[in-house]
Amino acid sequence: MATAHREDTDHGEDNFILEIHRIKERIQIQFVELRDCLSVRENTLIEELENILARYCTYKMEVEKITERRKRLKYQKRLYRNDEVNKLGKLVEKAGVINYTDQWNNCVKVFDSTAKYLFKFGDSKGENKMSLPTGLTICGNRILISQSSHCIMNYQLDGKFISKVGKDGNGNLEFNYPQGITIDELNRDVYICDYNNNRIQILSENLHYKSQFGKDILYNPCDIKLNRNNIFILGQSNPCLHIFNKDLVLLHRLVRHVEY
C-alpha cells in the first residue's frame, strides 16, 4: 500500500510540473505575441511620426520660400514705388533749381536746371536729423519734406532747418509713415499722404491742422498731385488711382490689379 501511494504522489507531482510548463509556455507565447504586437504598433507610430516630421519640414521650407519671396517683392515694390513717386513729382523745379529726395542717404540733393550738382542738406544726427525722406514740395520760400519718422520737416530754400511738425499716431497732426506731399497753389493748403493711416491730412501753409479725408476709401496712399479742379491720389497696394474733386468727393477709382 505504501508503494502504491508513492506512485500516486509521483504521478501528481509530474502532472503539476507539466501544468507549470504548459502555463509557462502559454505565458511565453503571449509575451511573444504581445511583443510582436507592440513592435508593429511601435513601427507604425514611428512611420507616422516620420511622416509628420517630413510634412513639417516641407511646410517649413515652403514658409521660408514664401517669406523670402515676400521680402523680395516688398523690396521690389519699394523700388517701384520710389521710381513712380519720382516720376510723379519728386523732382520739384523752383526758380531754375531742382530738389531731389535721396531717401536712402537721408538727405535732399539740389541741382541746377542743367542737372549740375549744387549742394545737399539734411542733418545726419540729432533730434532734427533727416530719416528716410519720402516726399518733397515747395511752399513759398520753404521746402516741406515728409519722412519716415512720422513728421514733416520745414526747411529754407538754402537747406537751413526751420522746424518740424507731427509725431507717430493716428490723431490730428499725427502720422504713420507719411509719404507724398503737395501744395494747393490756390489757397496754399498742404496735402500729405498719411500712408499707414490710409488718409490724406490737410494742413495750412503754416502747418496747422485743417482737415482730413479718404478714411475707408484710400489704402496706403503714397503720392498726391493737384490741379485746378481735381486731386489725384496714388495708392501703392494693388496700384490704384483715386480722383477727387476739390470738395473732397470721390469721382473715379482706377484700379490696376497686379498678379504675384
Image (cartoon, grey):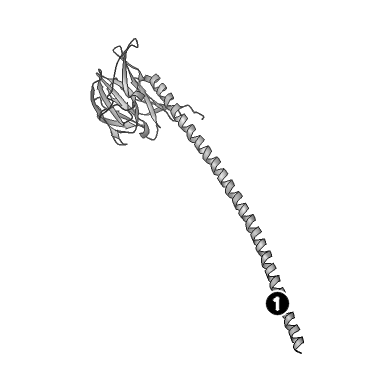
Counting every numbered tag in the picture gives 1
Q: In front: 25, or 102?
A: 25
The residue positioned farthest toward the front in the image shown: 3
Q: Position of residue 191 (x, y in %)?
A: 32, 26
Residue 244, how many percent across, how many down? 38, 26
Q: Is residue 253 visible?
A: no
Q: Camera-side residue: 60 or 141?
A: 60
Q: Is residue 27 above or below residue 48?
A: below
**Residue drawn 36% across and 19% down?**
89
Vertical order, 109 against 218 (above or below): above
Q: Residue at x 60, y 52 (%)?
A: 45
Question: Foreground residue, 238 or 120?
Answer: 120
Apparent side of residue 40 relative to residue 259 in the rendered image (left or right): right
Q: Residue at x 70, y 71 (%)?
A: 21
Crowding around mark 1 (Cα neighbors within 10 Å: few <14, some 14 to 19, many 20+) is few
**Relative to 163, is 10 above or below?**
below
- Residue 176 placement (x, y as % from top left): 34, 33
Can residue 14 be seen here? The reply is: yes
Left or right for 122, reference 44 = left
Residue closest to the eye, 168 or 45: 45
145 lies above or below 12: above
Q: Quadrant of the N terminus?
A: bottom right
Q: Secondary structure at mark 1?
A: helix
- The residue beneath circle 1 is 16
**Quarter residue 154 falls in:** top left
Q: Quadrant of residue 150?
A: top left
The answer to whether residue 109 is left or right of residue 78 is left
- Residue 20 in the image: x percent, y percent? 69, 73
**Quadrant of residue 216 within the rendered picture:** top left
Amino acid type, mark 1: Phe
Residue extending farthest top: 114
